Image (tube, coloured by chain):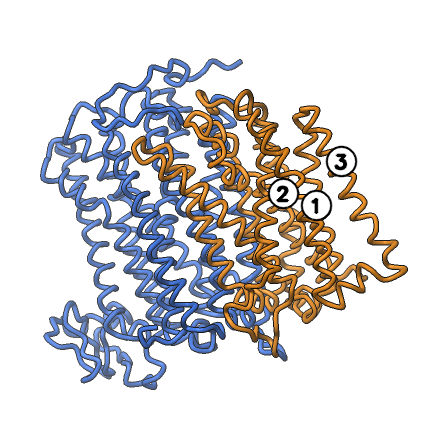
Amino acid sequence: MMLDLPFIWAALIAFAVLAYVVLDGFDLGVGILFPLIPGEAHRDEMMNSVAPVWDGNETWLVLGGGGLLAVFPLAYAIILPALYVPLTVMLLGLIFRGVAFEFRWKTKRGQFLWDWSFAFGSIVAAFAQGVALGALVQGIPVVGRAYAGGWWDWLTPFSLVTGVALVIGYALLGATWLILKTENHVQHRAYAIARWVAPATLLLIGLVSAWTPMLSANYLERWLVWPQILLVGPVPLAVMALGFVLWRGLTRRRELSPFLAAQGLFVLCFIGLGISFYPHIVPNSVTIWQAAAPDNSLSFLLVGAVVLIPLILAYTAYSYWVFRGKVNAVGGYH
Amino acid sequence: MFGLEALMLARIQFAFTVSFHIIFPAFSIGLASYLAVLNGLWLWTGRSVFLDLFNYWKKIFAVAFGMGVVSGIVMSYQFGTNWSVFSDKVGPVIGPLMGYEVLSAFFLEAGFLGVMLFGLSRVGPRLHFAATLMVALGTFMSAFWILSVNSWMQTPAGYAINEVGQFVATDWWAVVFNPSFPYRLVHMLLAAYLTTAFVVGAVGALHVLRDRGNEGARIMFSMAMWMAAIVAPIQIFAGDLHGLNTLEHQPAKVMAMEGHYQSHPDGAPLILFGIPNSAEKRIDYAIQIPKLSSLILKHDLNAPLAGLDTIPEHLQPPVGVVFWSFRVMVGIGFAMLGIGALSLYLRWRRQLYDARPFLRAAILMGPAGFVAVLAGWITTEVGRQPYTVYGLLTTAQSVSPIDAAAVGASLVAFIVVYFALFGAGTFYILRLMNHPPHVAESGLAPDEPVRAGGIMPGPVMDAKGALPVAP
């Protein structure tokens, strides 16, 4: 491992993607749970809990995509055509749910349409992200500097499972967020839902983790060969520990610990993915050094990133601070 | 699909999604600044009518901005899905500029939008104003970076080409401030301001026509007409400079705009109207003023001007589209100038709110800015064909190696979804605009009932009507 510009940028892009998953995950999750918590007032409350922050959360996705173009253009040029269908479906899903945030308040008669638009868009976007992730993990054929497969190659049992896993996982994030931000009926329902999706999430994490090493010799070697297993072994152990914390928080009706534990699970899964991928950015074929833009592109953008990312984190934290505490359906944030 | 190749489908898809997308920023850049001005005027004068107007336009801004965000995310991924070869080759130069756009603009807008929309009662008027300013600054920064990218593709500078065929920067200052960038930035920002001014003016005119005594409507109409009177002439001047810059760097584009198929060794005519006939290489039924084009472009009646006959056939842009879109843009520009001038005359005669034909004309001109922006966009983008990076990388060399079926299917999906969802959004915006601005205009209250008739008085909120006393 060496601390050069491509490595720093790989870490920054990974951070942006993780920030996206951690932040947009719970607001997508709120959308996924819309069908399970009917009632206009309850849905007002759910949507209001994320309305002031969803836009900032989704911006991390643009940083992930735009950043990849800037610093790993070859990876961007290979991965995006390979994931053409799931990414297009994701974008369409994000449009359906994004417009619902405003449109839902503009009509009484058509409100149910935008409720469905929000739920449907969130579920579709989450599923497509999971499928895209699975398709990337299982590997994509590369010839020269381009993707060399067809436009349905992404569709495998593995990618469908990762798609379902992400919908369930985001639902867990959404439920624990609602536990934190709401009261009474919505919170009560969120606890009940979380007690179903928490074990389901852990089960799916286990399934995907067991399946991944069978996909390629690289992964197998990374995870199951002595003595490397000593280095990577703590990750599954930590998943089990957090699963325990999550379950205890839910049964004891704690408000903060389930959310933090659920987010922790996502961070651990992400670290696990990082361990599987490194040093490749396109699994099994292109390393971060092969994909990196020339150093002067990396350093030009790094100057801005070093100054601006801490600023972004500061005013994002400020925005969350402004809207801290419980929301309620009647007054919203007003 | 329909016998079209992946290249053509990808071009149609990009043209479609970017044309939809550009409408929202063109509006929200100007509206964000307008909101900041209204917010500042409220704090400065303490007059609650400015807060009412702020809340009125804030609701419209929220809808337009939401659509801009989601249609913009599509753009940031489309470079990779449909134009992967372009991304690989050009990413090292334009990627960091787009990275700066995300870091310095998108996060700024998104981070402070929540506070601007929902936060007045939580953070107080001063911090709330700061948030409004940050949102406006964010829209400006976004325009700065993305137009730098677009300008570099039109007039590339400060680059070299490395051993794997990628463009790499040799001088970032030259890349960012490439030759056409200052002109394009000014021209586009003024276009955004004019677009917003004519929308605000149309809404103001509508409600002045219905109720001359509506103070909020009179103020927004008056402010919009000041903008039209001041900015429209500046815009025509800036557009002329932009055109001269284009003549220097992309002469073929200007030839297509002017309809000059042939060279004119001793003074070229200005063709006002006509029908481009690309097969015969001439303008049919041309109405033209002799030597005026040479005067405008070269400041000399007899200066020679080269025509498309000096450019190899396969490197010429399509003339018909560029010729017409340019005329639509210029025509609207002069109509805006006329409205602005007339408003000054009526203001001087103290008849600004009484001249009903003028108010009706202002309503008709409401969407004019959007049409002009799209027409200008088409002029510059079609006019630089057949290149993505001017003179260096052709559009045909830029496209992804992907099945036409994939591009075609996603194109159909985008068309259906955009028309349905953004159509609904436009409907909601028009309905909001149909409500008259009224005293004690509410903020974005989620429980606010829809007032179909627009006659129900707003809820009395004493805390929002006046400046809160400092704690």
Check the image and report above or below for B271 versus B236.
below
Q: Position of residue B362 (x, y in %)?
A: 18, 42
Q: Which residue is labeled 1 in the image?
A: A267
Q: Tell me, yes or no, whether dots 1 and 2 are on the same chain.
A: yes
Measured as percent of width and height from the top left, residue B394 is found at: 44, 77
The picture's colour for chain A is: orange
Chain with blue colouring: B
CA–CA distance between discs 1 and 2? 8 Å
Q: Nearer the viewer, residue B11 or A326?
A: A326
- Picture residue at 62% right of the left edge, 36% below the top: A196
Label 1 sits on a secondary structure element that is helix
The amino acid type found where label 3 is placed reads Phe
Res. A282 image quadrant: bottom right
Label 1 close to label 2 by CB (< 8 Å): yes
The answer to whether mark 2 and mark 3 are in CB contact below 8 A is no
- Residue bearing the label numbered 3: A244
Mark identifier at residue A22: 2
- Three-letter code, disc 1: Val
> Which quadrant: the C terminus of chain A?
top left
Tally of numbered tags: 3
Q: Nearer the viewer, mark 2 or mark 3?
A: 3
Front in this rendered view, residue B342 or B66:
B66
Q: At numbered mark 3, what does the secondary structure look like: helix, strand or loop?
A: helix
Q: Position of residue B11 (x, y in %)?
A: 38, 69
Give the mark nearer the N terminus: 2 vs 3. 2
